Amino acid sequence: MANNDEDKLYIIITMCLQNDFCEKIPQITIEEINSKFGHKVHLNYEETQRLWGLNNEMDKFINDMMRTAAIANSNDDDFKEYHFIHIRDWHDNSDREQLSELKVFGDHCIKGTHGAKFISPMDDLIKENLRFNLIVNSNSLNSFVHTNLDKNLKSIIESCGCDMKNVYIGIIGVVTNIKILFLAYDLSVTYQFPNVFLCTDLTAGFNKDGHDKGLELINNVALAQTQNLNDFRQKFEIL
């Protein structure tokens, strides 16, 4: 990528889009969900439905963002480049330091299990497009703590030779008022990225009240910009 004012580096970060958090479920109560999964981190039915969308918008967006990146990144004459970072909860229930969280929420996202896998179709698409997809394992509520997220962001930006003002970071995933909030704050305030955008339709809380409270804090404290799905697609030029 040539370094000029027309360059745009798009980095979309997905947060915990894993089966234990947001796998599609039938219409059951939160008590039945907790019993089914054996832990307390899966979204309730209403938030799961909203996240996936009435017309499977989540599925479509994941496919479209991968297709857009494959086209843009293979075009040497294009002034756009795409990279995706997928943060996943990644627990080890034999690690004594992780037992306190697992005791509160139950065993979830245990490495190597179905629950820890990325949702379909994202799991397969990441494997098919490793050139512009990175995975960051995290066992903390803050995705920068004890992870290589900071290093990966710097590496992507340096390899593209793009000015910070031309770096656009998008966020989708869960949980809005916890991990998403902390990530948005760190990107916008701690690391001072000037263009951080969160898609309200592709983020979710354990319930809608938690989601709405998270968005309020993200707007007022984390200083990231929130957008609906259509505006988010346009901002990141997703085909």
Image (spheres, grey):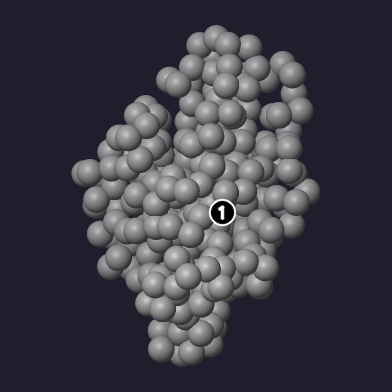
Residue 71 higher or lower than 40, as above or below = above
Q: Quadrant of the N terminus?
A: top right
Residue 8 higher or lower than 180, as above or below = above
Q: Residue at x 56, y 68 (%)?
A: 92
Provide residue 115's location: percent of width, then percent of height: 60, 72
Q: Residue at x 50, y 11 (%)?
A: 5
Q: Furthest residue to the front? A: 96
Q: Residue at x 40, y 61 (%)?
A: 175
Q: Seen in the image, is 69 located left or right of residue 22?
A: right
Residue type, numbered disc 1: Asn
Provide residue 166's location: percent of width, then percent of height: 48, 21
Provide residue 65's location: percent of width, then percent of height: 63, 44
Q: Which residue is mark 1?
A: 137
User: Quarter-wise, where is residue 184 in the image?
Assistant: top left
Q: Secondary structure at mark 1?
A: strand
Q: Seen in the image, is 123 located left or right of residue 38?
A: right
Provide residue 79's location: percent of width, then percent of height: 62, 19
Badge 1: few (under 14), some or many (20 or more) residues near its Cα, within 10 Å? some
Viewer-nearest residue: 73 or 187: 187
Q: Residue at x 51, y 85 (%)?
A: 38
